[in-house]
Image: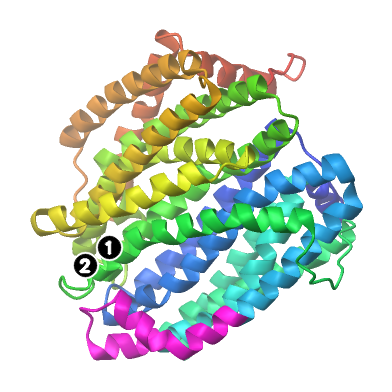
Amino acid sequence: MKKVLNWLGGKKGKGAGFSLLSIGNLLIAFITYLRFAEIAQIFGTTWQTDAASIAMVIPILLQQVIFTAFGAVFMPVYSKVILQKGDTAGNRLISRIINWMSLSGALLIGIVLLFGSSVVRFIGPGAEENTLVLAGKILTIFLPVIFLNSIEGILHNFLIYGKRYGLVSFVRVFQILVSYIIVLLGHESLGIMVIPVSGVAGAFVSFSICAVISLRLRLHYQLTIDPRDHDFRGMVRLAMPVIIGVVTGFLGPVADKVLASFLRTSSVTALDYASRIRNLIRIILIQPIIILSTVSLAKIAAENNLKKLKSELSSFIKYFSYYAVPVSGILVVLSVPLISILFQRGNFGPEQSQRIGYALAFYSPWFAQLGIGRIVDRVFYSLKEPIIPVIIGIWGVMANILLNIILLQPLGINGLALATTLTSGAKTLFLMYFLRKRLGGINGSDFIPEYLKILLSTVVMAGYLLLSSRLFPVELNASLSERIFNISLSIVPAVFIYVVITALVGSKTYRIYADVVKCKLLPGRKHPRV
């Protein structure tokens, strides 16, 4: 066990880092799925699950602020401090950030305790009184997560900068595993409260392990609060517009829940479940490439090498698109049967599979471009220019809310999902346009033809999926084994068709991935640069 941990704790290159993060995220997604499936089986979609969904909005928002906002601006500032001033200055910066985040977390907990009931009423204005009362109680239990996540987010970034990708994955896997075990052991005695209790327990264990590991890796913590440090003030200045952008951007999902609360009971839960499944897929598809790009782009920007920065951006877009676009195509066509296979048991029946599956289908094109938008975001942050992403994010929220209102009546929760997909795609295009103007080009001649080849191959694959779904329909009331067999007849050949088509159209990314696979199978072969 010690040897395994030592290997996980070693510094890794980009290729090994991507593999470790991907494997870790697969484990995280799998255990998260087991936990989610257990909750769905026990509680189904009821007013109680609506209450849990409403209560989790604020903790998730704060988590997004910590991991997205501070994570995005921390890496460029920390990279420059390490490059110019060394490890001692880097430790001072991290210590100040941790201390101020601790104070801020305590303040936020106090504010939520005072105004928690008003918050849940704002998020679920159409919900019944018993739902809102329960949501307030669940929110109170969730509050320690605010403090724990605020500090852990910075420690994660410290480990990521040091290329300790295996340790980051290990900590996150252990966190969700603890949470899942508590759901299994405590759902009978705790009831719906097992959801927040398990979340807090997992966050506490994850924070404790992350703190111990960081200290062992020579993070010298100092009890310093003085905010006059030049680097700290610079990071705060960068963080403020990003925080505004993240908070504003989160108004879209809040608006989704507000509008869904006026639909029939369990609509909030159905939309939330679709969003959770979307986030599970995001963890697998997008999170590893975002973590790697954050570190890589920040270090290149600190060197002020714009040519290398554009080349790195193009490479990340191609690597991400090759696997994310076809996954989007599969989900658009097969979301309903996939949901039935993954979750349909206990109190979760065919009706829930259809409602959540259709919503996920409208979310699915979101995966094909979200990673690109996040990578382009990271370029702006690495250049310490967060204003444009923030402005585009604010525009996106307004457009999303407007589309929500337009699409809610004809499409219900599916309209809310479609609005998110459309505005997210538009934001990605705007980000790329303004980055192109800022850098004088973004190597579009390199990645755009490649993306079009990937898209063409995905369209051909989707055509096969539509045909096979008619030839081998998945009946929701059929046995689990029959549903798995029929959907396998669609997905397995579809993936083969996609890979063959990308090879036939001359995809460069296909050749890179094919060479990586050959190197794994033939150890004597020279490994390609990824």
Whole-percent x and y of residue 48?
32, 82
Magenta span includes 129: yes
Magenta span includes 56: no
The residue under label 1 is which amino acid type?
A: Asp
Q: Dominant secondary structure of the magenta stretch?
A: helix
Q: Is residue 471 above or below residue 94?
A: above
Q: Residue at x 47, y 44 (%)?
A: 389
- Residue under numbered circle 1: 256
* Element marked by disc 2: helix
The residue under label 2 is which amino acid type?
A: Leu
Kindly indicate whether the residue at mark 2 contacts the one at mark 1 (C-beta within 8 angstroms): yes
Q: Nearer the viewer, residue 256 or 52?
A: 256
Whole-percent x and y of residue 30?
51, 55
Q: Is residue 139 left or right of residue 50?
A: right
Which dot marks residue 259?
2
* Element marked by disc 1: helix
Whole-percent x and y of residue 401?
25, 57
Q: Is residue 440 left or right of residue 250?
A: right
**Disc 2: CA contacts within 10 A as few (<14), some (14-19) or many (>=20):** many
Q: Residue at x 27, y 81 (%)?
A: 47
Q: Which residues are magenta?
A: 107-136
Q: Residue at x 58, y 52 (%)?
A: 27
Q: Is residue 135 left or right of residue 215?
A: left
Q: Residue at x 56, y 82 (%)?
A: 109
Q: Nearer the viewer, residue 214 or 312?
A: 312
Judge whether residue 488 can be spotted in this image. Answer: no
Judge whether residue 15 can be spotted in this image. Answer: yes
